[in-house]
Image (tube, rainbow, N blue to C red):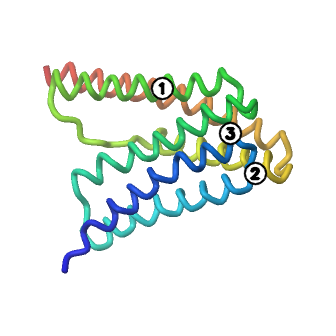
C-alpha cells in the first residue's frame, strides 16, 4: 500500500488548523494559539521531510504547502493586527509583498510559461523572520516574554527582508520574463 498521500494529508491538516489558531488569537487565548501554531510549524517540517525522504513529492503538495504557509502567516498577521499586537504598517508590507509575488507569478505563468517554485535565500530568511516574529508576538501576548525589544528587533528584521525579498522577486522574475518572451 502506497503512503504517498501522507504529506498532502498533513498539509491539509495544517490548513484546517488555521481557523482555530485565528479564533484563539481573536478570543485572547494566546497560549492555546501558540500551541496550535507550534503544531502547525511542526507539521510543515514533517510533511516536507516525509515528501523528500520517501520520494512522496507531488505537484499538489508543491502547490498546497506554500498556500498553507501563506494562509497561516497572512491570517496571523491580520488577526494580530486586529488585536493591536502588530502594527498595521508591518502587516500591510507583508501582505503587499505576497500579493506582488502571487500576482507576478500568475502573470508569468499565463504570459511566459509555468512557474516552478524557487524561493531565494533572502525569501527563506524572510519566512524565518516572519515565523519567529509571530512566535515572539504570541509568546509576548501569552506569557509577557520575551522583552519588547526582541519583538521590535525581529519586526525590523522582518520589514527589511520583506522589502529586499519582494524587490528580489520582482527583479529576478522580470529578467526571466524578458528572456522568455
Q: Which of 98 and 78 is in front in this view?
A: 78
Q: What element carries label 1?
A: helix
Q: In which quarter of the image is the N terminus?
A: bottom left
The residue wearing badge 1 is 97
Which mark sits nearer the N-terminus, 1 or 2? 1
> In 3D space, how far apart are the residues under numbered discs 3 and 1 (Cα atoms)?
24 Å
Q: What element carries label 2?
A: helix
Residue at x 25%, y 61% (from the top left corner): 57
Q: Which residue lies furthest to the bottom in this view?
A: 1
The residue wearing badge 3 is 26
Eye-nearest disc, 3 or 2: 3
Instruction: Locate residue 131 relative to residue 5 in the image: left or right.
Output: right
Eye-nearest disc, 1 or 2: 2
Q: Which of 46 and 156 is in front in this view?
A: 46
> In 3D space, how far apart are the residues under numbered discs 1 and 2 (Cα atoms)?
25 Å
How dense is the environment of label 3, judged by Cα within 10 Å: few (below 14), some, or many (20 and up)? Answer: some
Q: Are marks 3 and 1 in contact (CB under 8 Å)?
A: no
Residue 110 has which mark? Answer: none
Residue at x 32%, y 68% (from the top left corner): 6
Q: Where is residue 117 in the image (x, y as percent from the top left)?
A: 30, 42
Q: Looking at the image, how many numbered discs can be counted on the residues?
A: 3
Residue at x 60%, y 43% (from the top left corner): 22
Q: In which quarter of the image is the C terminus?
A: top left
Which mark sits nearer the N-terminus, 3 or 2? 3
Residue 139 has which mark? Answer: 2
How dense is the environment of label 1, judged by Cα within 10 Å: few (below 14), some, or many (20 and up)? Answer: many
Amino acid at each position: 500500500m502506497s503512503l504517498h498521500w501522507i504529506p498532502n494529508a498533513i498539509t491539509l491538516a495544517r490548513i484546517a488548523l488555521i481557523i482555530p489558531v485565528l479564533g484563539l488569537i481573536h478570543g485572547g487565548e494566546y497560549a492555546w494559539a501558540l500551541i496550535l501554531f507550534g503544531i502547525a510549524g511542526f507539521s510543515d517540517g514533517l510533511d516536507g521531510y516525509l515528501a523528500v525522504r520517501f520520494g512522496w513529492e507531488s505537484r499538489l503538495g508543491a502547490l498546497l504547502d506554500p498556500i498553507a504557509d501563506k494562509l497561516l502567516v497572512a491570517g496571523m498577521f491580520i488577526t494580530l493586527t486586529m488585536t493591536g499586537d502588530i502594527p498595521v504598517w508591518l502587516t500591510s508590507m507583508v501582505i503587499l509583498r505576497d500579493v506582488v509575488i502571487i500576482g507576478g507569478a500568475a502573470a508569468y505563468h499565463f504570459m511566459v510559461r509555468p512557474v516552478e517554485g524557487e524561493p531565494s535565500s533572502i525569501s527563506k530568511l524572510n519566512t524565518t523572520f516572519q515565523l519567529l516574529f509571530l512566535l515572539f508576538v504570541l509568546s509576548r501576548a501569552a506569557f509577557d516574554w520575551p522583552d519588547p525589544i526582541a519583538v521590535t528587533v525581529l519586526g525590523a528584521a522582518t520589514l527589511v527582508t520583506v522589502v529586499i525579498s519582494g524587490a528580489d522577486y520582482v527583479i529576478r522574475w522580470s529578467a526571466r520574463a524578458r528572456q522568455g518572451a
